[in-house]
Amino acid sequence: MRYFPDPDKNLDLGAVNRVVEAAFADHGKGLVQMPPKIYVTLPAGDFRTMPGFLPTLGIAGVKIVNVHPDNPKMGLPTVMALTIILDIATGKPAAILNATRLTDLRTGAAGAIAAKYLAPKKECVLGVIGTGRQAEAQVRATAQEISLTGIRVWNRNSVHASAFAARLSPLSAESVSLEQACDCDVLVTTTPSRVPLIKSEWIHPGTHINAIGADAPGKEELDPEILHRARVFVDDPAQAFHSGEINVPISTGNYQPWMIAGTLGEVVIGKKKRENPDEITIFDSTGLAIQDLAIASLAMRQAPGMELPFL
Amino acid sequence: MRYFPDPDKNLDLGAVNRVVEAAFADHGKGLVQMPPKIYVTLPAGDFRTMPGFLPTLGIAGVKIVNVHPDNPKMGLPTVMALTIILDIATGKPAAILNATRLTDLRTGAAGAIAAKYLAPKKECVLGVIGTGRQAEAQVRATAQEISLTGIRVWNRNSVHASAFAARLSPLSAESVSLEQACDCDVLVTTTPSRVPLIKSEWIHPGTHINAIGADAPGKEELDPEILHRARVFVDDPAQAFHSGEINVPISTGNYQPWMIAGTLGEVVIGKKKRENPDEITIFDSTGLAIQDLAIASLAMRQAPGMELPFL
C-alpha cells in the first residue's frame, strides 16, 4: 500500500482535463458505479464519503472530504481530503492519496470540460465570482480548454479581488463590479452563498454558467429565474437535486427535477449539446467520486509515494 | 496524520467488548450518525463504505472493507479493511488504521454483547457453525462475557472443524455433526451460505442465535421458520433488511420488517430484553460503522503508529 503526500506535484492541467473528460464520458455511457455521496454532520462542519468504480480506467475507491468553514481561522484549509484506492482484482487497499489539492484540480477540470463543450464561442471573456482556491483552479483549468480574451473578477472583498486579478494578470484578469463580472461569455460562480448573488437581468443570452459553489443543501448562487431561462446540465442528477445549484429551487417547488436538460456526461459523448449561440446554458457541479478516481489514476502514475506496511 | 499498521496488537478483548457495548448503547439512545453502508460491486467481489460519527466517544470516520471470496487462493484474506479517522473539530484526517483484524474483533464483540444480554442462562453450551476467522473471533469474545461449559463445532470440512476444536481445546471445544452443534444454549452461525443450513427442528426453545454470516443480499443461514418462532433483534434495521439474515425472507415476502423485536442497542440500554427462558432469540448482525469507530478509538490509544505528512 502506497501513500502519496503530494500527488498533485508535477500534474499537467491538460492531462487532468483529459482524464476527467474520459470519466464523464464513461458516466454518460452508464459504465461507472457511483452511489450518491453521503453526508455526515460534525459540530463545526461535515464530511462526505464518495465511493466509486471506473471500469474503463481500472480504478475503484473512496474519497473522504470535509467542509469546515471556520478552519481558516485555525490556519487550516476549509476543505481537506483523502482518496483511498483499492486493487480491483482483490479489494486490497492499494493507495492512499492526500486529495486536498487534487479536489481543487478535479473540480476545476469539470468546469473546464463543461466550458469546452458549452461555451458559446471559441474566444471568451471569463467572469469569475469568488476568488478562493476553487476560483483559481477553475480559471487555470478552463484556460487549457478555451481561449480567454479577458477575465473579470469579483469578490465582496475588493482587496481579495485585486490580489486574485494580479496573480492571474498574465491572463488579463481585472477586478470589477459584480454586475460587470456577469457581462461575459462564460461565468464561473464559486462562492459558498446561501442567497442568490447573481441577478437574472445581468445574464445576457448566450452565456454559459459554471455553477460550482453550491455543493450542499441550502446553498445557491443564481437567481432561480436564470434556471428557467437556461438549459441546465448537471454532473449527477441525484447529487444535484440534493445539494447542487438547483437544490433550493427544487425544495421550494420553484424548479422541477424533470426540467434538467441532461448530464455533462451526455454532453461529452455528444448525446446532448448547446443548441444555438443565444441559449443560456448552466453546468451545475456537485463533484463526483469518478472525478476523484480519474485524477488519482493519473497522479499515482507520476507522483512520488511511500510504501506502508499492510497485512 | 498517523498510520496504524497493527492496531489490534495488545488489544484486550474485554476492553473491546466494553467499547463496542458503549457504541450500541449510544445507538440505542439515538445519539449516533450512521448512514447505511454502501456497496460497490467489483468483478470478483465487492467493497463496502461505512461512514459514521459517535459523539460520546468523540470519534468520526469511515471504514472501507472488501469481500473477495477467491482471495485465499491468492494467499490474501477474503476481507481486508482500512478505517479512516477524522478530527471532529476540523475534519482533518487524523488516522488511518489497518482494520482487517479489527473487523474480526469488532464483529466478535457484537456477538458477545448480544450473548451477554440474550443468552438464556449464565453458563452456556456454545454451538459454532463455520470455523473461519470470524468463528474464532466470536468464540473468544463471547468467552469474555458468559461462562462456556462446552463448545460444539461444525464445519462442512471435518478436518477444518477438528483443527478449530483443537485450537480452542482449553475452552472444551469438540467437533460434532451439524445437528449436534445446534443442540446448545447459544448458537453462532458464521458461514457465507446462500441456502439455509440450520433446520428449525434442530433449534430447541430457549436458544439464543447469533446470525453473523449473512452480510450481503442473497445470503442466509437459518430456515426462515426459525425467524417465525423467534424474537429477532438486529444491529441496524436498514442494513438488516438489505443484507442481514432476514434479507432473503423479506425479499420473498416470508418475513416482514415490522416483525423485528428491536435493535441490539435497545437491548443494551434495557428498553428491550429476553422475556422468558424458553424464548428463542436471534441477533442478526450486519456490522456497523460505529463498531469500527469504537474499536478504532481504543486501538489508537494503545497501538504503535507512524506519523505521515499531510497538508
Image: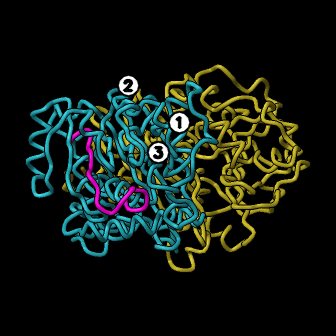
Chain colours: A yellow, B cyan
Check the picture and name the quadrant holding the N terminus of chain B.
Answer: bottom left
Along the line of sight, the residue nearer the viewer: B297 or B228: B228
State how many labels appear: 3
* Residue at image mark 3: A292
The secondary element bearing badge 2 is classed as loop
Amino acid marked by disc 2: Val
* Residue at image mark 2: B195
Measure how far apart labels 3 and 2 are at the Cα level. 39 Å
Along the line of sight, the residue nearer the viewer: A132 or A59: A59
Disc 1 crowd, CA 10 A, few/some/many (<14, 14-19, 20+)? some
Disc 2 crowd, CA 10 A, few/some/many (<14, 14-19, 20+)? few
Q: Residue under mark 3: which chain is it in?
A: A
* Residue at image mark 1: B228
The secondary element bearing badge 1 is classed as helix
Amino acid marked by disc 1: His
In percent of width and height, residue B72 lies at 18, 35
Q: Does residue A107 appear in the picture of this structure?
A: yes
Membership of B311 in magenta stretch: no
Please provide the residue range marked out in magenta: B116-131
For marks 1 and 2, give the one nearer the viewer. Answer: 1
Q: Residue under mark 1: which chain is it in?
A: B
Q: Which mark is residue B11?
A: none
Question: Which residue is depicted at the point 34% across and 65% down?
Answer: B17
Along the line of sight, the residue nearer the viewer: A260 or B136: B136
Amino acid marked by disc 3: Asp
